[in-house]
Image: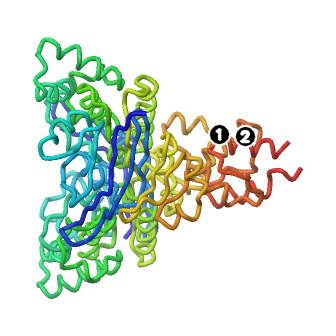
Amino acid sequence: MAITFEQVNFSYGAGTTLAQRVLHDITVDMPTGKVTAIVGQTGSGKSTLIQHINGLLKPTSGQIRIDDFELTASTKEKELVNLRQKVGIVFQFPENQLFANTVLEDVMYAPLNFGATKDAAKLEAARALNRVGVSEDLWGKSPFELSGGQMRRVAMAGTLASNPSVVVMDEPAAGLDPKGQTELLSIVLELKKLGKTIIFISHQMDHVVAVADQVVVMNEGRVVAKETPRQLFNRELSWFQTMKLDLPKAGQLAEKLKDKGVTLSRRPLDLGELAELINQEVGHE
Amino acid sequence: MTQAIKIDNLKYNYNNDQVLFDGFNLTIDSGQWVALVGHNGSGKSTLAKLILGLIAANSGNIDVFGERLTVDTVHHVREQIGMVFQNPDNQFVGATVADDVAFGLENKQIPSVEMPRMIDEALSIVGMLDFKDREPHMLSGGQKQRVALASVLALQPKIIILDEATAMLDPDGRATIMHTLQDLKARFGHDITFVTITHDMDEAILADRVVVINDGQLILDGTPANVFSQYDVIHNNGLELPFAGELAEKLDAKPKSYLDERELIQWLSRLNK
């Protein structure tokens, strides 16, 4: 399901004297079956933007098309039920939202809520848990007995169990150990393989490079760039300083090398590319 | 040198049956900055809880500045240890930043005339004095953790334990906390002992000493340079080296010993001449 924002404006407290404009004239598309990363400093409007994708917030003006659904200021609350079944959101540190007695019950909650029978919900939950790699011997346990990485995956399964075609994630891999981060990012790529449209917010540029097809950069409520990671991270260094954005670690190190007189032929995106460039270009003169 | 924490032959089982620590020993000298690293579930946070007496060991001893941790001494031991936890949102009680720092002082029954000075001092050390009348929930994650650190500092602990205090922060917030810790280290020198529990090696590298644990076992213990020269051991225990270390491993021409980022860059720039 493709998502298109058309001239979307959003203000908190719209129509009151306290109105505070958070999103300015957003026009952007997030293509079907692709991974779109949304980046920008804290307060740039990223979270406000993603909450429009499943109608948690409605635009003050403009519209958002999610497949054939059209979200505008006048969309009624009860029309949103269908939308929410199609768009799942995984919030930051979703493990804080686990609540049921067992892992399985926790993941069954959403399908049950959307009207599935108990058996159907169980089936969906089992499929979602398998998809994120939570082994069956954990399903009967309390979610609170699990490790941080496992809890995160159970919480993701909770969103996936209603089989959404769009999955929105806020910092999916934050706070996990290196192995947990790698695993979480590979789940994102698995979901993409299943044809899902994925949107994720991240401050970790290395995560962006690892999974994103396109990057949307937000600054002060506006979209200031929309391009591939390769295009984005090739921009002038001063642009990143203005936007208060980091380069991926490999790019940061390449810039430090440049300061010491070692200039590589391009700015690398990740560790592998950095090592390759150094191996080819340094010390062979 | 005075021993800040001495853990001797510690045994601890999860849920009374799963063995975590089986004869664990670790001594931390006063004034040291020790990074305790391990993957999620390696036992590092449990160790912090045992030191604080939040959970009790099955057997073995923990001494804090020579005082044995027991049911009778636990309150006195805790007075010497400040703890900053992972989630910045779970550790606020005050309506303003200043109130929050005051909370700990009130618990310690500090005379109220002395409090404003102590609060200002603690907040200024972490660079948060300008925020003293703000509501904690309006702060960024990194600012919240600095306030949490100020609340701990106001109580003048001899030991500060940070349990994955930066894990939930964005890179900016993480950097400000690490800078704050380096400032504290420069300011208090040997008067404060730091234990930072983390799985981020770019953080661990700032410590004087790195202790790697896994499944309740001590795997490596040494200076950052020593520990990070053990590439295979680090990876076999679900961890990674700091970025520069990972890079060095992938180079055709490798430096002879472990280099930190600054050293590696220097080494590469010489190679190019």
Residue A5 visible in the snapshot: no
Viewed as shown, does residue B134 lie left or right of A134?
Answer: left
Q: Position of residue A51 (x, y in %)?
A: 27, 54
- The residue labelled by disc 2 is B266
Q: Nearer the viewer, residue A274 or B87?
A: B87
Which residue corresponds to the image point at 52% horizontal and 34% vertical from the top-left? Answer: A242
**Residue at the top extreme, as displayed:** B113
**Residue at the right extreme, as displayed:** A285
Q: Looking at the image, do the residues carrying marks 2 and 1 touch, with CB atoms under 8 Å apart?
A: yes
Residue type, numbered disc 2: Gln
Whole-angstrom CA distance, mark 2 to mark 1, is 6 Å
Residue type, numbered disc 1: Arg
Which residue corresponds to the image point at 67% horizontal and 50% vertical from the top-left? Answer: A267
Viewed as shown, does residue A68 lie left or right of A118?
Answer: right
Q: How many marks?
A: 2
* Circle 1 crowding by C-alpha within 10 Å: few under 14, some 14–19, many from 20: few
| The quadrant where residue A13 appears | top left
Q: Which chain carries label 1?
A: B
* Circle 2 crowding by C-alpha within 10 Å: few under 14, some 14–19, many from 20: some
Q: Where is residue A40 in the image (x, y as percent from the top left)?
A: 43, 44
Which residue corresponds to the image point at 20% horizontal and 74% vertical from the top-left? Answer: A103
- The residue labelled by disc 1 is B262
| The quadrant where residue A20 appears | top left
Q: Nearer the viewer, residue B88 or A238?
A: B88
